[in-house]
Amino acid sequence: METWDVMRQDDHGNEFHLSAHESRISALAQILVMESGVVHKQMYWVAGPPGPFLRTNRDLYLHFLQLGQEARAASWSLSAFLRSLWKVSGPLRDQDTLEPDDVAAMFSAASTTPPVEFDPDWSVRDLSLPGEEPEGYGDWERVVLSQLADLEDFLNSPPGPQARFGVDAPRPAGSGRRATPPRWYNFDPATYLECAVAGSLGGWDAADGARVPLPTGTSDPAPARSYVRSLATMTWADLAKIAVCGQMYE
């Protein structure tokens, strides 16, 4: 059986073995958890078979589908999950591009680390995008913080039983500008994660049990799956699109 080891080097150049994992993504996720919110001079890395482990949009879709099921079983709220996601993203903020394994590891790490507290400043801060389209980590951060501000507003003005058919975030007087549209369809991590990848990258199959093909309006049968395609590197703009699809895709 292949394993991936999490290694650490201290300030004196000494190397230590911290843990062994059956998945490269799990090993990468552990490093993100250890590095998030901590300022140190120690270096962590993964030793083992080289990546990537995830090679297609379907690989990433299935990974997100599994994470959503685990979050549902653990009764995570979407706000808590996104606050953890924002927390563990910090170690990657200086990277312009990410491998699919890095993206998967970031979301995996979010499901295993306690979330930060909601910062009321997020609700009144100007989180609008400086350009027409998101670019870089800062814009992805604006998208996630905008969603967190919306979810906090929903606590005071619950969306009601028809929320899954679409509802606008209340955004009361005094709210700051936000990077995301006000429309919401998905309010739990499982639905958010499934829609995030299905809407932005595809990779779903009706046999997965999470998505029902919609009628085409023609004599052609509804597609039972989306195209499977290779994934190379991804940008923070890609992750911003993933986040918006998590909020709005049906």
Image (tube, helix red, strand yellow):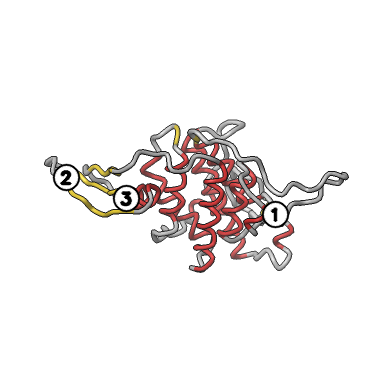
From the top left corner, tell me how far across and down residue 202 is, in percent: 63, 43
Quick one: SS at disc 3?
Answer: loop
Residue type, numbered disc 2:
Glu
The tag on residue 168 is: 1
> Residue at position x 81%, y 50% from top?
215
Task: Evaluate whether residue 36 shows in this view.
Answer: no
Front residue of this view, candidates 151 and 193: 193
Marks 3 and 2 sit apart, C-alpha to C-alpha, by 18 Å
Q: Quadrant of residue 65?
A: bottom right
> Residue at position x 27%, y 46% from top?
39
Q: Nearer the viewer, mark 3 or mark 1?
A: 3
**Label 3 vs 2, first from the N-terminus:** 3
Which residue corresponds to mark 3? 3
Quick one: SS at disc 1?
Answer: strand
The tag on residue 125 is: none
Left or right side of 140 for 226: right
Marks 1 and 2 sit apart, C-alpha to C-alpha, by 52 Å
Marks 3 and 1 sit apart, C-alpha to C-alpha, by 46 Å
From the top left corner, tell me how far across and down residue 78 is, in percent: 54, 59
Which residue corresponds to mark 2? 15
Task: Evaluate whether residue 81 shows in this view.
Answer: yes
